[in-house]
Image: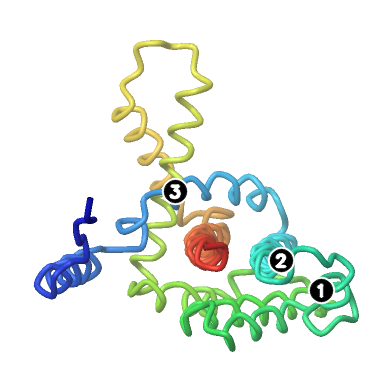
Amino acid sequence: MKKKNTKPTEDELKAEYQRRLDKWNNAKSLVDLYPESKELFPEIYTKLINESDRGAILIGAAYAEGFLEDFIHGILPRDNKQYKGKLLNYPGPISSFSSKIELLYAFRYMSSKNYETLNIIRKIRNKAAHEKKEFFLHEHRESIIKAFSTQYGDGARHFKEKAISRLVDYLTKQGLSESKEEDLDPKEFRRVIESEFVNKKLEGHWKLLIPKLELIEGLSLLMFQLAMNSKKTLELLND
């Protein structure tokens, strides 16, 4: 029996392109496009929130570099561990964070926006690693905003609001799971947490915490995007 031709028509391709374009244009953030990215926020939050500002950027950058290294591992020949080690272990040609970024961008495995974002994070990481004086993220907030908000089309105010909203969502979920009261209204519980947080967010250490929340929010979105790129690329390579 002859197989039916399932190749989409030109009109169908145009309609699908328009649908995706509309979805992109109407989205307020990458979270709207990829709600699955929310799953990465708790993971990165728990890793960074209790760290010092210096520790947060060092661990966050290492987390990003680990994603890139896993991606490169998937691209390199599978049956030659010694060759992989020669390239990725110090002083191999792609052992540094910078060289991993350059390699993946040069071969078009990442977008120019991801390339710019990762390099800004790398530069902040380098300052944290090499400066002897105390390191504070709020002194680099402009760079953090540039790294992430330009990529997702938001200004500093909107990006801060999203970072705080994501934190409130996380604290609500955590609080509900730990509560012994069975009849708690999730919406009301969230409202109370949000009210408490909003009232305190511009006071004392909360104000200094904002850049760290923005870093966590931005990294969770970036890591998800890199993971999606990696998954799609490796699926094509394995076909």
Q: Residues within 10 Å of mark 1 (few under 14, many from 20)?
A: some
Task: Answer yes or no: is residue 211 visible.
Answer: no
Q: Are marks 3 and 1 in contact (CB under 8 Å)?
A: no
Instruction: Give the mark nearer the N terminus: 2 vs 1.
Output: 2
Q: How is the image coloured?
A: rainbow
Q: Residue furthest left?
A: 11
Which label sits on residue 73?
2
Three-letter residue code for mark 1: Leu
At numbered mark 2, what does the secondary structure look like: helix, strand or loop?
helix
Separation of residues labelled 2 and 1 (CA atoms) = 9 Å
Instruction: Say which of 171 and 18 sits in front.
Output: 18
Q: Is residue 142 above or below residue 190?
A: below
**Residue type marked 3:** Lys
CB of mark 3 within 8 Å of CB of mark 2?
no
Question: Mark 2 touching mark 1, by CB under 8 A?
Answer: yes
Q: Amino acid at mark 2?
A: His
Image position of 5 with respect to 118: above or below: above
Q: Nearer the viewer, mark 2 or mark 1?
A: 2
Q: Residue furthest front?
A: 1
Q: How many residues crowd mark 2 within 10 Å: few (<14), some (14–19), many (20+)?
A: some
Residue identifier under label 3: 38
At horizontal 49% and vertical 27% (from top left) the residue drawn is 175
For the point 35% across and 68% down, which residue is it? 157
Q: CA distance from mark 3 to mark 1?
A: 30 Å
In this image, 94 relative to 36: left or right?
Answer: right
- Whole-percent x and y of residue 60? 66, 62
Q: Let me know if residue 170 appears in the view.
A: yes
Q: Estimate the x, y position of residue 92 in percent, counting from the top left.
A: 86, 81
Instruction: Give the residue at x 77% y 80%.
Output: 94
Q: Position of residue 91 (x, y in %)?
A: 90, 81
| Mark 1, residue position | 88
Instruction: Please tell me which of labels 3 and 2 falls first in the chain.
Output: 3
